[in-house]
Image (cartoon, rainbow, N blue to C red):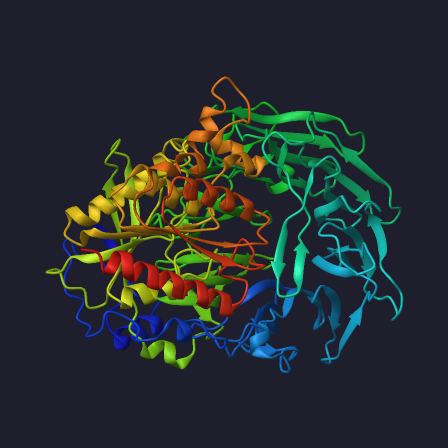
């Protein structure tokens, strides 16, 4: 099947019209054959510097939504001028007005790229708590801002008690003379009526910085808190040495490789008044914890987890008082790949709601008692990403791709079962909801291929009455011509599996031409109907730049991705750098067969896992790609996180070391014949720069030519560190692809 639909538009006039009417614009089909887009220009006329500037053209996305306890207003973090510093804002459901509550960024210099307020929570009666630079502040109803708990650093995970009288949070503590702070932390509870100078009470935590609280949640009655605690004492520490203008630095990290000791995780419950706590043991503390929760009466606790390779999903239910454990649910699948499970208590504590792919697709089930066969609530050849329970009304709200693979729409279904109702309107795109306490309203982060993210308000009683709260893009955004973006389906050229791609065409696309193509940024879950496609890296600008320079940009929903069912993703098992890169090639073949692409001018790029796929594609498919760029490439799966064993398999076995070597670009790079550029930051704790050095060493020994762009002190997300670094790296990419792809003959 060819193109499904497009949210791109060919002219600035059409774009502004579509944005103004996005909540009522029906899906517009792309034709079965490419046609002329009608625009004079292929895309934006802006340079990399102009696309990536301190006052962002697309604005600053509103984030961090928090509802007031009465559901009458919602807090959010935003900058209405497009700078990086987010201040605190509020929107009133009753009046329909938004109000800026803080102006802490007014003295921030744009080039400092300060992020501003990290998180905020509504305390009721016009008060709010928020964190700034890791320190806790209170914003009073009269506008006064006071820093509290001044002895604490790295404050995060703010949560208000159900009665609204206490604030719980996690913080780290200084660990050395230079006042550095642990990433883990301690759990504190502060009485909101406390006088100035009175400190919070520490309710959970160890003086050992390697034992820390990862997350927590209040019980419905506010008497207890359930928490997850991590213990990293057995894990190895690694020195990551790198140089900056200030000399030799050491980014020392706690970091396990496959086969190393890993984090031991435990769930506990603490009595807030007495500090008495109980930890609930699991058969293997090294197994993953994917969720936990107290029943509404506080008497039972579920813990959802799996083995290290995510092949066996198990839900334990504990008696909170006695600690007695029962195995409530268990499902073993030898080739299971993605831990997308979610669990919550059913209305009235009548068992559990389980999001699982036991029928081949991620759907909702209800299981009343331990060992019962779960009752399926939703079904179909589509998948649910997340859900919430409106226990009072017996409704389950969820986000799913029922309308289209690239979408994340909002739906609800009766807990008892019945018809699924879409509540997010007809416009395609991506929704990320935060529900009010009474589920009467939704604070909705929404974006599509033509629309940068905005905050909308949805009335769940009248879903069509959606209100737009923010207006983030700068006026110049609407004067630009942007890419024409659509979606295509085609079969894998290897096994016929249905694949889906996101395709960005020049706005003045001419079917008589054959265009150069950039495949990427390649990664799993890369096909999304939202501004820029993937959000993990700020690649929206370079994608638009490439299209404006006459390239087509292609992303494929490779095997291992969410959204197309269990059979689709499980075929990626034990197949890093094999099935995934075959899917990418299938996308390239599709564009060539349909007359879009010049087969001699195809480039590929990606970062991290995407870097692995880039190098593997050049090594195993010489001539398919004219050139490739690998950012922070994961070249050696022996140095992956142990969690990645759910794809690459265990660290031992009779097929080792051949299995890991087959999935490691370091051992396959001898096949590279086409131009390669590697971009890597020296501080990277996720994919070690030393792995890039090892790759470079072997390629030099074989006299294979490549280009290396080293970013001193750069992190794993090298395009997100600073704008100057991102612009530098993107310009290097543009120059490389223009030389080796666009100019190829």
Q: Is any atom of residue 526 visible in this view?
A: yes
List x then y, in percent, for residue 405. 35, 47
Q: Residue at x 19, y 58 (%)?
A: 515
Q: Position of residue 256 (x, y in %)?
A: 63, 38
Q: In the figure, 548 relative to 522: above or below?
A: below
Q: Does residue 475 appear to the left or right of 234 in the view shown? A: left
Instruction: Give the residue displayed 61% in from the left and 71% down from the top.
Output: 114
User: Relative to the observer, which residue lies in front, 213 or 546?
Assistant: 546
* Residue at the extreme left: 512
Q: Is residue 158 found left or right of 10 in the rendered image?
A: right
Q: Is residue 618 above or below residue 431?
A: above
Q: Nearer the viewer, residue 280 or 559?
A: 559
Residue 611: % across, % down? 42, 47
Number of numbered tags placed on the structure image? 0
Residue sitting at x 64%, y 82%: 107
Q: Is residue 380 visible?
A: no
- Left or right relative to 654: residue 623: left
The quadrant of the picture occupied by the C terminus is bottom left
Relative to residue 695, is residue 711 depicted above or below? below
Q: Quadrant of residue 703?
A: top left
The quarter of the picture where the N terminus appears is top left
Residue 284 located left or right of residue 442: right
Q: Closest to the observer: 516 or 479?
A: 516
Image coords of residue 394 (percent x, y): 55, 46
Residue located farthest toward the top when viewing the structure as drawn? 654
């Amino acid at each position: 099947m060819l193109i499904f639909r497009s949210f791109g538009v060919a002219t600035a006039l059409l774009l502004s019209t579509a944005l103004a009417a996005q909540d009522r614009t029906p899906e517009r089909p792309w034709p079965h054959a490419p046609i002329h887009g009608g625009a004079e220009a292929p895309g934006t006329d802006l340079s990399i510097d102009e696309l990536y500037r301190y006052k962002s053209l697309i604005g600053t996305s509103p984030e961090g939504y928090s509802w007031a306890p009465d559901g009458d207003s919602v807090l959010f973090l935003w900058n209405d001028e497009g700078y990086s510093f987010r201040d605190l804002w509020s929107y009133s459901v009753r009046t329909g007005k938004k109000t800026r509550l803080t102006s802490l960024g007014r003295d921030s210099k744009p080039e400092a790229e300060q992020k501003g307020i990290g998180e905020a929570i509504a305390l009721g009666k016009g008060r709010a708590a928020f964190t700034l630079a890791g320190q806790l502040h209170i914003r009073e109803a009269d506008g006064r801002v006071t820093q509290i708990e001044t002895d604490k650093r790295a404050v995060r995970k703010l949560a208000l008690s159900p009665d609204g009288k206490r604030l719980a949070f996690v913080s780290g503590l200084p660990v050395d003379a230079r006042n550095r702070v642990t990433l883990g932390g301690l759990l504190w509870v502060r009485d909101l009526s406390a006088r100035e100078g009175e400190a919070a009470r520490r309710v959970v935590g160890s003086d050992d910085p390697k034992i820390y609280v990862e997350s927590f949640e209040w019980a419905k009655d506010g008497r207890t808190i359930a928490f997850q605690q991590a213990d990293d004492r057995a894990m190895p520490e690694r020195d990551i040495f790198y140089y900056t203008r200030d000399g030799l630095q050491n980014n020392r990290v706690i970091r396990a490789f496959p086969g190393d000791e890993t984090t031991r995780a435990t769930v506990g419950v603490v009595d807030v008044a007495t500090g008495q706590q109980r930890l609930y043991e699991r058969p293997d503390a090294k197994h993953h914890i994917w969720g936990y929760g107290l029943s509404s009466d506080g008497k039972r606790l579920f813990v959802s987890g799996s083995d290290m390779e995510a092949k066996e999903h198990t839900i334990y239910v504990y008696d909170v008082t006695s600690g007695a454990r029962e195995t409530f649910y268990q499902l073993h699948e030898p080739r299971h790949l993605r831990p997308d499970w979610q669990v919550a208590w059913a209305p009235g504590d009548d068992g559990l709601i389980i999001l699982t792919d036991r029928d081949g697709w991620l759907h909702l089930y209800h299981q009343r008692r331990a060992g019962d066969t779960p009752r399926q609530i939703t079904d179909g050849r589509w998948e649910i990403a997340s859900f919430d329970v409106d226990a009072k009304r017996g409704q389950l709200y969820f986000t799913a791709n029922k309308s289209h693979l690239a979408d994340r729409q909002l739906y609800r279904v009766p807990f008892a079962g019945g018809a699924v109702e879409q509540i997010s309107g007809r416009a395609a795109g991506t929704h990320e909801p935060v529900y009010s306490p009474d589920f009467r309203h939704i604070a909705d982060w929404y974006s599509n291929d033509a629309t940068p993210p905005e905050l909308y308000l949805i009335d769940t009683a009248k879903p069509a009455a959606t209100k737009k709260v923010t207006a983030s893009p700068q006026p110049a955004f609407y004067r630009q011509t942007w890419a024409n973006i659509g979606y295509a389906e085609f079969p894998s050229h290897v096994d016929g599996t249905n694949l889906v791609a996101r395709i960005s065409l020049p706005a003045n696309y001419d079917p008589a031409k054959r265009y150069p193509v950039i495949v990427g940024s390649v990664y799993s879950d890369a096909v999304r109907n939202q501004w820029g496609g993937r959000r993990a890296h700020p690649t929206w600008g370079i994608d638009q730049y490439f299209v404006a320079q006459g390239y087509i940009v292609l992303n494929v929903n490779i095997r291992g991705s969410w959204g197309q069912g269990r059979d689709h993703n499980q075929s990626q098992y034990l197949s890093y750098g094999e099935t995934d890169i075959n899917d990418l090639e299938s996308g390239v073949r599709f564009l060539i067969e349909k007359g879009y692409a010049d087969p001699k001018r195809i480039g590929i790029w990606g970062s991290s896992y995407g870097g692995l796929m880039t190098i593997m594609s050049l090594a195993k498919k010489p001539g398919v790609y004219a050139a490739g760029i690998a950012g922070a490439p994961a070249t050696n799966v022996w140095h992956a996180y142990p969690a990645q064993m759910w794809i690459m398999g265990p660290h031992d076995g009779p097929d080792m070391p051949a299995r890991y070597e087959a999935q490691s670009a370091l051992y396959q790079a001898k096949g590279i014949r086409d131009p390669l550029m590697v971009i890597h930051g020296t501080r990277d704790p996720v994919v070690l720069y030393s792995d890039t050095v090892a790759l470079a060493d072997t390629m030099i020994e074989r006299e294979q030519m490549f280009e290396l762009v080293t970013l001193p002190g750069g992190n794993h997300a090298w395009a997100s560190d600073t704008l100057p670094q991102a612009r530098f790296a993107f310009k290097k990419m543009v120059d490389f692809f223009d030389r080796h792809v666009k100019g190829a003959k």
